[in-house]
Amino acid sequence: MQTFLTALADNAPNVSIACTAADISRKNAYKWRDKTPDFKEAWDNITEVCVDETERFLTLVSQGKEDAKPCQVTAAIFMLKCRRRKVYGERFVIDEDTPPDARYL
């Protein structure tokens, strides 16, 4: 398990690369995650650190302290929208007053 976690930290949040490094299947990695609370916590912490680093990267880019290609910025924004949906995700309010044709995006 430690080899997987080390590889995940080095390549976060790419589970496939971590599985290859640890010589395990993705299926087994997720089984371990579901059955081992400490492993799940370590995995989640690694992922959160990666997301924190992505936020820091975008902050530095926006301040002109870091150079980045447009594709790097787009990928970072996409990651934040997926991993921190409550903060960066799209927000839609659909209620009974929303026209039926506007309910499907």
Image (tube, rainbow, N blue to C red):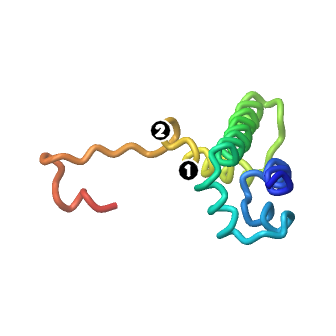
Disc 1 packing (10 Å; few <14; some 14–19; many ≥20): some
x and y percentages locating residue 38 in the rendered image: 68, 43
Residue at 25%, 57% (x, y): give it. Answer: 103
Residue toward you, 26 or 102: 26
Q: Is residue 51 left or right of residue 81?
A: right
Disc 2 is placed on an element classified as helix
Q: Tell me the residue that label 2 is attached to.
A: 86
Residue at 83%, 41% (x, y): give it. Answer: 67
Residue at 55%, 46% (x, y): give it. Answer: 81
Disc 1 is placed on an element classified as helix
Q: Which label sits on residue 8? A: none
x and y percentages locating residue 19 in the rendered image: 78, 65
Residue at 63%, 61% (x, y): give it. Answer: 30
- Name which residue type carries label 2: Lys
Farthest front residue? 35
User: Picture quarter containing residue 14?
Assistant: bottom right
Q: Which label sits on residue 82? A: 1
